[in-house]
Image: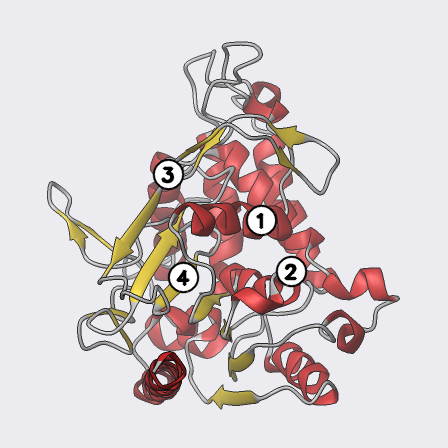
């Protein structure tokens, strides 16, 4: 969907002309009340569920969560996935031409924030005729967007599902992001962000950035169980190549990532992570930041997620309780680290399914009340 009206950004810049790529699943009901927005994390996209044909076949990044009969049941709900501005999967970003110059934006693409993404998503909802979402849901960076929706558009969201997320990054998280960015910025093939014109890709920097990130997505226990100190060969090689299975795995992940992800997008999205801090405008008081919310909340964390630890989710829960909001909290004892929000833990899936059962029942009740008032 193309937008020609300027989008003011939190930085003071604006995008005069942009496109959002989105994907939908299920059917919008006559009342337009059963829409659920699913917000993506760092390296995901609008392709939330199902499979694209072709080679290789592309499965949606939350295909285990979204679909007919799944926890977010598309036989009930109309689900929307939106690719955020600045991404490299179709929506306007650094790879696209700047209308003012006719050349790719590159590093000149304006820095965007979680709040900017939410405002763009709201415009898309307007175009689709959706005045209020039954729910907005996301994990990790997507959870930040779900939380921001509840604050920026309190009357347009009935439920906010914030999974494996945080109200702000810790100093350690910001440090990891900066090291990853430095790997890209110092790659000789980066060319100050204009590598498109040189016909190259800063793959070395992207590889290292992904390796750093991937380490933080897994728990120590998960790494130990999957890889331990297993060697690729029977003996040490006494060099600087690959000795251990974990090294091989990380290099494989880095190589794969460098083939499909845009370096400028990585810089933009990690900065959006760093900048998210809704309490900052309230002297650090998260309760004050959430005071105008009207939604009901599901907050989920995972015990071994040290990137966005359960303590951070509990901060959100406490701030909501301080505001007397309806909030359900689940802390799942899972061994997989931050990536647990993408996996098939039965307890986690059951919690989400039960919550969407409640959302569905409320839709039925609201429809019955509306019918009675009309009569």
- Assign a secondary structure to mark 1: helix
Look at discs 1 and 3 and give the one toward the viewer.
1
Q: Reading the chain from its start, which is encountered first: label 3 or label 2? A: 3
Q: Quarter of the image for the N terminus: give it.
A: top left
The residue nearer to you, when weighing 277 against 38, is: 38
The residue indicated by pointer 3 is 89
Instruction: Report the front residue among 260 and 41.
Output: 41
Q: Quick one: SS at disc 4?
A: strand
Residue that numbered label 1 is attached to? 119
Q: Residue at x 53, y 59 (%)?
A: 141
- Separation of residues labelled 4 and 2 (CA atoms): 17 Å
Q: Which residue is mark 2?
A: 152
- In depth, the one of 323 and 142 nearer the eye is 323
The residue shown at (59%, 45%) is: 180
> Mark 1 near mark 2, Cβ–Cβ under 8 Å?
yes
**Residues at marks 1 and 3, CA–CA distance in whole angstroms:** 19 Å
The crowd level at tag 3 (other Cα within 10 Å; few <14, some 14-19, many 20+) is many
Give the percent coordinates (x, y) of residue 44: 39, 51
Give the mark, 1 or 2, whose residue is nearer the N terminus: 1
Q: Is residue 301 visible?
A: yes
Between the C-alphas of marks 3 and 4, the distance is 16 Å
Which comes before the other along the chain, label 1 or label 3?
A: 3
Q: Position of residue 193 (x, y in %)?
A: 57, 23
Q: Which mark is residue 38?
A: 4
Q: What SS does tag 2 mark?
A: helix
Q: Quadrant of residue 358?
A: bottom left
Q: Quadrant of the C terminus?
A: bottom left
Q: Residue furthest front?
A: 375
């Amino acid at each position: 969907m193309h937008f020609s009206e300027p989008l003011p950004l939190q930085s003071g810049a604006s995008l005069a002309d942009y496109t959002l790529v989105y994907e939908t699943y299920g059917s919008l009901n006559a009342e337009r009340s059963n829409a659920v927005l699913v917000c993506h994390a760092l390296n995901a996209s609008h392709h939330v569920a199902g499979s694209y044909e072709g080679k290789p076949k592309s499965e949606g990044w939350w295909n285990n969560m979204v679909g007919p009969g799944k926890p977010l049941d598309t036989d009930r709900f109309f689900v929307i996935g939106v690719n955020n501005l600045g991404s490299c999967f179709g929506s306007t970003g650094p790879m696209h031409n700047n209308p003012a110059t006719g050349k790719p934006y590159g590093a000149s693409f304006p820095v965007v924030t979680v709040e900017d993404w939410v405002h763009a998503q709201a415009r898309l909802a307007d175009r689709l005729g959706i005045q209020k979402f039954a729910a907005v849901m996301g994990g990790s960076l997507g959870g930040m967007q779900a939380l921001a929706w509840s604050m920026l558009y309190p009357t347009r969201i009935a439920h906010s599902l914030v999974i494996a997320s945080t109200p702000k990054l810790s100093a350690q998280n910001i440090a990891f992001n900066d090291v990853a960015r430095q790997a890209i910025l110092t790659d000789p093939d980066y060319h100050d962000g204009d590598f498109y014109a040189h016909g190259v890709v800063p793959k070395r920097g992207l590889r290292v950035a992904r390796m750093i990130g991937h380490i933080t997505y897994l728990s120590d226990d998960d790494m130990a169980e999957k890889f331990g100190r297993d060697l690729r060969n029977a003996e040490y090689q006494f060099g600087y190549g690959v000795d251990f299975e974990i090294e091989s795995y990380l290099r494989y992940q880095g190589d794969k990532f460098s083939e499909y992800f845009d370096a400028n997008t990585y810089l933009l999205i990690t900065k959006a992570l760093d900048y998210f801090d809704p309490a900052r405008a309230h002297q650090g008081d998260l309760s004050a930041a959430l005071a105008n919310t009207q939604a009901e909340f599901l907050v989920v964390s995972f015990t071994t997620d040290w990137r966005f630890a359960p303590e951070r989710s509990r901060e959100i829960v406490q701030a909501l309780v301080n505001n007397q909001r309806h909030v359900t909290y689940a802390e799942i004892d899972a061994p997989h680290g931050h990536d647990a929000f993408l996996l098939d833990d039965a307890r986690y899936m059951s919690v989400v399914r039960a919550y969407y059962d409640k959302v569905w029942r409320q839709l039925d009740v609201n429809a019955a009340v509306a019918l009675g008032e009309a009569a």
